[in-house]
Amino acid sequence: MRCPFCAHDNSQVKDSRPTEDNSAIRRRRQCESCGARFTTFERVQLREVTVVKSGDRRQPFDRTKLEQSVTLACRKRSVEPERIAQLVSGIQRQVETSGESEVASSRIGEMVMEGLKQLDSVAYIRFASVYRDFSEARDFEEFASSVQDAAAEKPRGRS
């Protein structure tokens, strides 16, 4: 593994352990050249998936990009990082096990929205505002009203 500090090609694994949701292995490494320590993650990748974006542009599926989008939507909310990682892992698993080598970015966006709807309503609205390209305050208002109406219709558990 290449050192992110000095670009030396060799590093030594000092510690390995599974992540909290057992979806990856976290490794602490030390560069053999400069001695710097850094962390890497090893995840299972079932298949190479290409994301088809608008205008028929194609690019490889990038878990990091997905994780950054979800994290940004959840910023300053009381959503634990483990729950974000679980959501991202679940979406990645769905994409990789779909049997398709290509998936539309709109399908991934819908998966994210469905996951955020369960996780945090504010994060859901934030993500939707970018994903659905809200252009006016009225767009926010209408969407937030629909979220609020859906929440009011949910049956509440008895205390």
Image (cartoon, rainbow, N blue to C red):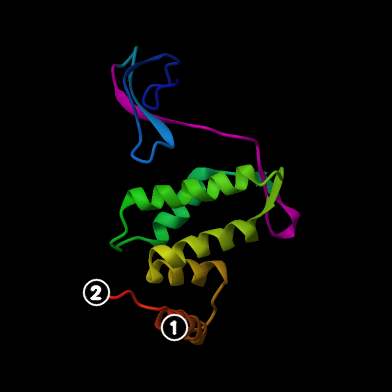
Q: Is residue 83 magenta?
A: no
Q: In front: mark 2 or mark 1?
A: 2
Residue that carries the numbered disc 1 in the rendered image:
153
In the image: residue 78, left or right of residue 100 = left
Compared to residue 6, the image places residue 58 above or below, namely below
Q: Quadrant of the N terminus?
A: top left
Residue type at mark 2 is: Ser
Disc 2 from disc 1: Cα separation: 18 Å
Number of callouts: 2
Q: Secondary structure at mark 2?
A: loop
Q: Residue furthest front?
A: 158
Q: Position of residue 69 (x, y in %)?
A: 47, 56
Q: Quadrant of the C terminus?
A: bottom left
Residue that carries the numbered disc 2 in the rendered image:
159
Q: Residue at x 52, y 32 (%)?
A: 44
In the image: residue 13, left or right of residue 129 = left
Residue type at mark 1 is: Glu
- Residue placed most toward the observer, 100 or 134: 100
Q: Position of residue 138 (x, y in %)?
A: 50, 87
In the image: residue 90, left or right of residue 59 = left
10 Å neighbourhood of mark 1: few (<14), some, or many (≥20)?
A: few
Q: Is residue 49 magenta?
A: yes
**Highlighted magenta segment, given as a residue range:** 35-57
- Residue placed most toward the observer, 80 or 94: 94
- Residue placed most toward the observer, 32 or 117: 117
Q: Secondary structure at mark 1?
A: helix
Q: Residue furthest right?
A: 56
Q: Position of residue 6 (x, y in %)?
A: 38, 22
Compared to residue 56, the image places residue 13 above or below, namely above
In the image: residue 38, left or right of residue 136 = left
